[in-house]
Image (cartoon, rainbow, N blue to C red):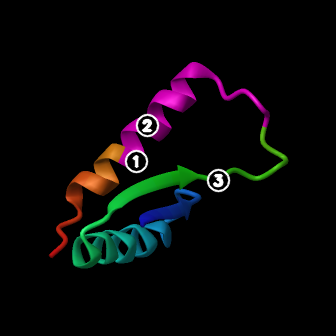
Amino acid sequence: MKILCAIDLLPKSKFAIHRAGMLAVQLGEDLSLLRVVCPKEPEQMPEPDMQHVSWELKFRVARVLWG
């Protein structure tokens, strides 16, 4: 089994990431995060924005302590 957690990077996403991480640890499974975007957003995000999103995800996940 694999766990997929869809997030939108709004502040409430931290709770979804935390819960999904706890489940992954409890079940001994891998966790994947998927960033979802509003269909109104442009298909291709400018590179600086993509870098910011990547940093934001890494920062949020790194700060979470599961177990």
If you read the primary sequence from the N terminus, does the residue marked by circle 2 or circle 3 appear first?
3
Rendered image quadrant of residue 3: bottom left
- What is the crowding at mark 3: few (fewer than 14 residues within 10 Å), some, or many (at least 20)? few
Q: Residues within 10 Å of mark 2 (few under 14, many from 20)?
A: few
Is 48 located above or below residue 21 in the figure? above
Q: Residue at x 23, y 52 (%)?
A: 62
Q: Which residue position is annotated with label 3?
A: 36
Judged left or right of residue 36, residue 31 is left
Q: Which residue is mark 2?
A: 54
Marks 2 and 3, Cα distance to the nearest angstrom? 13 Å
Residue 67, horizontal then vertical, whole percent: 15, 76
Tag shown at residue 49? none
Identified by mark 1, the residue type is: Leu
Whether residues under marks 1 and 3 lie with C-beta atoms below 8 angstroms apart, the answer is no
Magenta stretch prevailing secondary structure: helix
Q: Secondary structure at mark 3?
A: loop
Q: Which residue is mark 1?
A: 57
